[in-house]
Image: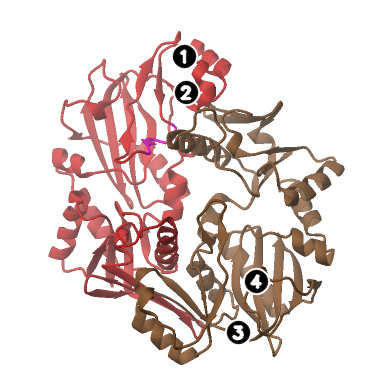
Chain colours: A red, B brown
Amino acid sequence: MTVLVLTCEEDLTADMVVTILHDRGVPLVRLDPADLPGRVALSADYAHHAFHGYLKADERMVSLRSLRSIWVRRPGTPGTRAEEQSAWLATEAEHALYGMLTCTPARWMNHPVAAAQARYKPWQLHLAQQSGFTIPPTLITTFPSVARQFAATHRDLVVKSVSGKHPGEPPMVLPTTRIGPDVDFTGVAASPTLLQRHIHKQADIRLTCVGGRLFAARKQADPDEVDSRFTQNAAWKPTEIPDTVRRSVAAYLRLAQLSYGAFDFAEDREGAWWFLECNQGGQFGFIQLDTDQPIAQAIATWLAEEPA
Amino acid sequence: MTVLVLTCEEDLTADMVVTILHDRGVPLVRLDPADLPGRVALSADYAHHAFHGYLKADERMVSLRSLRSIWVRRPGTPGTRAEEQSAWLATEAEHALYGMLTCTPARWMNHPVAAAQARYKPWQLHLAQQSGFTIPPTLITTFPSVARQFAATHRDLVVKSVSGKHPGEPPMVLPTTRIGPDVDFTGVAASPTLLQRHIHKQADIRLTCVGGRLFAARKQADPDEVDSRFTQNAAWKPTEIPDTVRRSVAAYLRLAQLSYGAFDFAEDREGAWWFLECNQGGQFGFIQLDTDQPIAQAIATWLAEEPA
């Protein structure tokens, strides 16, 4: 049984996992969907009430039936390295590849359907509530009057992107920005805006979940800092996970049908963890570098497990 | 409890259903996501462990809690009628709207996650096999040699788009084209290609499924015609549904988690139905016009049902 890794060529995080799988002797095919058609080829045959699919990457051929797991890391867009590119080709190649792959009984980290749903932050927040996490009071609105009222109630706010990423090339991550209650909210009418009560945090928490294995890391926060992704500061250190958080994580991942998730929390001055988001494709390399937590090993183990 | 209809302004098929719901006194909000932000506004508030969302369309306000059902007909892309358009705004508006809507307990026709999966034709064919339908021998490939071998085996073929639609503005539907075994398959390497054994059909069958209600229509085929969508010919007439097909439809819709599906079959000279595809958003107006089958009424009834 083979592990399929879908990612772009330059992906050091994927390299960490691929190296471990190689060392363990686990058969593996790594390919970038951007190379279909070209270095990547495929075929799916429906005959005699059965489906046979296979993929070829460089000179490796793999039957879809022999896939034990599929890791969706940082895949390129199908068709985008073809000699003659077009939106038409991209759509055809995407439907052929992912349409075939979703016919396999392989385990996914994460399944594209679950991943698409899990990217919606309004849904993440709702699911977090249902799973028993504590979330900061949050508003997503296009009504300036509602934004004003929320600001008057909560006073100290942050504003965030609803979707998380600016769709540029390369994509930009927009920083979370702290605002006071007296800003002009007129512009809210022009774009849905996410406002959240600012949590006075003493630390950032990143909780990386691989199947049922959890790795929590904590980083002391500068009291004046809002978004620590944009500053050089303290190192991440391993930390204990409260039992209530363990239970909520299990509920969240089960409801979202995710096998991997990177949760971000703000730890307040009383030590409580406030759910901020769960990134189903979140990076883990920087955490492993700081903490030595064996996250790549856990992913390799999950991917290499024999199907039940 | 309110029905939410997501569709563009000019949609005669939606008009049929909306008129019936109005006549039955069912509360209804119809909006086009393209009008967010602008004529459509939204707000979602997460506080005290609960989620409150509401939508405003023109001057109608509706709470997401009061939605009994959501009909995704022909929605525009969020953000695309805003004064200042951008890819960024489109992404933010899409995440805000669909992220909020997928938090509701409303019933969907069809849920966006199920719809996205159901559009993959390679998956449709596999699901059809699993559901007990008979499908024509089919190949999706980028290997010219495999295409040649398939052609040599089956001789009389059709070639189709894998994804179904050319992504132009307006989108084009590409006709299914009949080919012989001696065509040059070299070009297959440049784009995944779907080849299918040609079924010598005596009729086209369109089976429209609304929840558990099935409406089958049959149209006599010209023996020389391959793709009847592009020709003016016989009218659609109601027809009986074989029991085996009923069972397979039920299995397919359950596995795909669809509440609506438009199945296309080719009826061969022995009267057997060959599964061609299931379009989760397929049109039904033209069938209802020809056959007087009450499909719009069935959709209205499904949408108006009280949640269990």
Please name the residue that numbered disc 4 is placed on.
Answer: B264
Query: Of circles 2 and 4, which is in front?
Result: 4
The alpha-carbon separation of the residues under discs 2 and 4 comes to 49 Å
Query: Please, what secondary structure does the residue beneath circle 3 have?
Result: loop
Q: Chain of mark 4?
A: B
Residue closest to the eye, A250 or B111: B111
First to last magenta residue range: A162-167
Please name the residue that numbered disc 2 is placed on.
Answer: A137
Q: Is residue B173 left or right of residue A273?
A: right
Q: Chain of mark 2?
A: A
The alpha-carbon separation of the residues under discs 1 and 3 comes to 66 Å
Residue closest to the eye, B224 or A47: B224
Please name the residue that numbered disc 1 is placed on.
Answer: A154
Badge 1 crowding class, 10 Å Cα cut-off, few under 14, some 14 to 19, many 20 or more, is some
Please name the residue that numbered disc 3 is placed on.
Answer: B199
Query: Please, what secondary structure does the residue beneath circle 1 have?
Result: helix
Badge 3 crowding class, 10 Å Cα cut-off, few under 14, some 14 to 19, many 20 or more, is some
